[in-house]
Image (tube, helix red, strand yellow):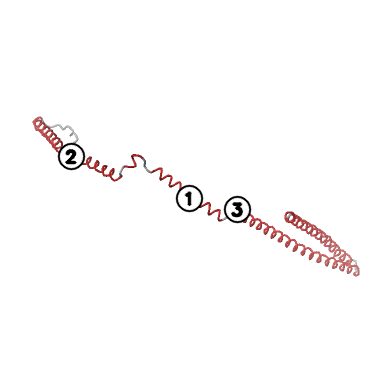
Amino acid sequence: MFGRIFGKPKQEANTLTTLDKLNETLEMLEKKEKVLLKKAAAEVEKAKEFTKAKNKRAAIQCLKRKRLYEQQIEQLGNFQLRIHDQMIMLEGAKATTETVDALRTGAAAMKAMQKATNIDDVDKTMDEINEQTENMKQIQEALATPIGASADFDEDELEAELEELEGAELEEQLLQPATTAPAAPVQVPAGRQPARAAQKQHTAEEDELAALQAEMAL
């Protein structure tokens, strides 16, 4: 158990240490390569000077040393390429390991949550919720049911009585005399005033007759 707990940080530390070591080696090889390039360039300059001085033997020796430096430079380049490849592979492996660890942690967390929420417990909880909902509905229906004297009332009889009241009110409205709005005063010649008075008297008699008919009908 403790090996699992402390193994991953130690492994990660070893990976980082290895990457640091590879970087240091790469920097060292690059420095050596620069030095060898300078030496090779210097041998070329010496060979030119010996050639001007007609010293062919010394010029050839300079070119030989330049070739040796170039071979070492090429070898250092191969070393650097291998280190670059190893660093890339190591970084890729590190990323893969971290990804797998993250996925493993997520799977363990999901497993723990599924264990905490068993399907049987979920079904039981849903059944309890449905049962409580049904009980509450029955309680509400029981509270809405009329009790006492109001429970003995017949809804059909009440509706029939209401219809009778509405019919009587409608019949009363139909038997009431129609009222007319008072006409606006109109100026007429003096000779026609008696005719207007006779018209008013005739209208009043009709109203009284209509009221009498309504009373007899009731």
> Which label is found at residue 94?
none
Looking at the image, is 52 positioned above or below residue 121? below
Residue type at mark 2 is Leu
Q: Residues within 10 Å of mark 1 (few under 14, many from 20)?
A: few
Report which quarter residue 110 is drawn in. Answer: bottom right
Residue 97 coordinates in the image, percent (x, y): 70, 59
Question: Which residue carries the number 3 mark?
Answer: 116
What secondary structure is marked by label 1? helix
Question: Which residue carries the number 2 mark?
Answer: 175
**Which residue is more in the foreground, 51 or 39?**
39
Looking at the image, is 93 positioned above or below residue 127? below
What secondary structure is marked by label 2? helix
Residue type at mark 1 is Glu
Report which quarter residue 88 is drawn in. Answer: bottom right
Residue 85 coordinates in the image, percent (x, y): 74, 64
**Which residue is more in the foreground, 119 or 178?**
119
Question: Which residue carries the number 1 mark?
Answer: 131
Report which quarter residue 42 is drawn in. Answer: bottom right
Apparent side of residue 130 relative to residue 30 in the rendered image (left or right): left
What secondary structure is marked by label 3? helix
Residue type at mark 3 is Ala
Apparent side of residue 94 relative to residue 114 in the rendered image (left or right): right
Looking at the image, is 39 positioned above or below residue 125? below
